[in-house]
Amino acid sequence: MSEIRTGLGWDVHRIATGRKMILGGVTVPCEFGLEGHSDADVLAHAITDAILGAAALGDIGMHFPDSDPRWKGCDSLVFLRHARDLATQKGYRIVNVDSTIILERPKLKDFRQTIRERLAETLELDVDRVSVKFKTAEKVGPVGEGRSAESQAIVTLEK
């Protein structure tokens, strides 16, 4: 009988001018980006945490602390690959990823397939095992006021 595990990830970053908007490893043309120690890819961070959580391997901050200068400006897909590799070393395979980006603007629907493909490639999955959804916060709270972006992810692992 196989063992199934589920992990939940969440991340938030402030909106910042002078930064790139990178979501799921894809640069989205925008007049602002997200603030963070790495490239601030809120989606990659949430998925990384979901994988680590499902495999009981801690969280992204344990593996890539923002106090470590090695990770300054780092491509967050490095974090995602690391989580994938750690889960694989424990005998798990990623079954699927379901994720949501919560952001008032820009509208992201035209980037869905590109983001899914980049994540699938990084995680070594078929693209039909990666879901990316987009929501707004309906003008409520920091996300709704355009001050931040959030992402949520759930990952299923099987051994």
Image (cartoon, rainbow, N blue to C red):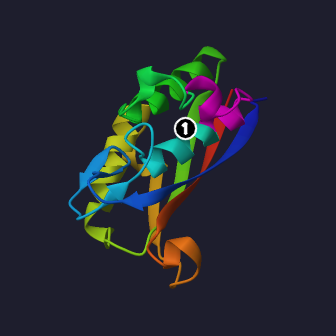
Q: Vertical placement of 29 versus 159: above or below?
A: below
Question: Front-most of 31 and 138?
Answer: 31
Question: Front-most of 18 and 132?
Answer: 18
Whether residue 54 is in magenta: the answer is: yes
Q: Vertical placement of 65 versus 86: above or below?
A: below
Position of the C terminus, as image quadrant, is top right
Q: Residue at x 52, y 27 (%)?
A: 84
Q: Residue at x 40, y 30 (%)?
A: 72
Q: Amino acid at mark 1?
A: Thr
Q: Vertical placement of 13 versus 119: above or below?
A: below
Range of residues picked out in magenta = 51-64
Q: Is residue 121 left or right of residue 5?
A: left
Q: Position of residue 4 (x, y in %)?
A: 73, 37
Q: Residue at x 47, y 58 (%)?
A: 14
Whether residue 1 is in magenta: the answer is: no
Q: Residues within 10 Å of mark 1 (few under 14, many from 20)?
A: many
**Residue 101 visible in the displayed image:** no
Q: Residue at x 42, y 20 (%)?
A: 70
Q: Vertical placement of 65 versus 16: above or below?
A: above
Kindly state the secondary structure of the residue where label 1 is placed. Answer: helix
Q: Position of residue 107 (x, y in %)?
A: 32, 73
Disc 1 marks which residue?
Answer: 48
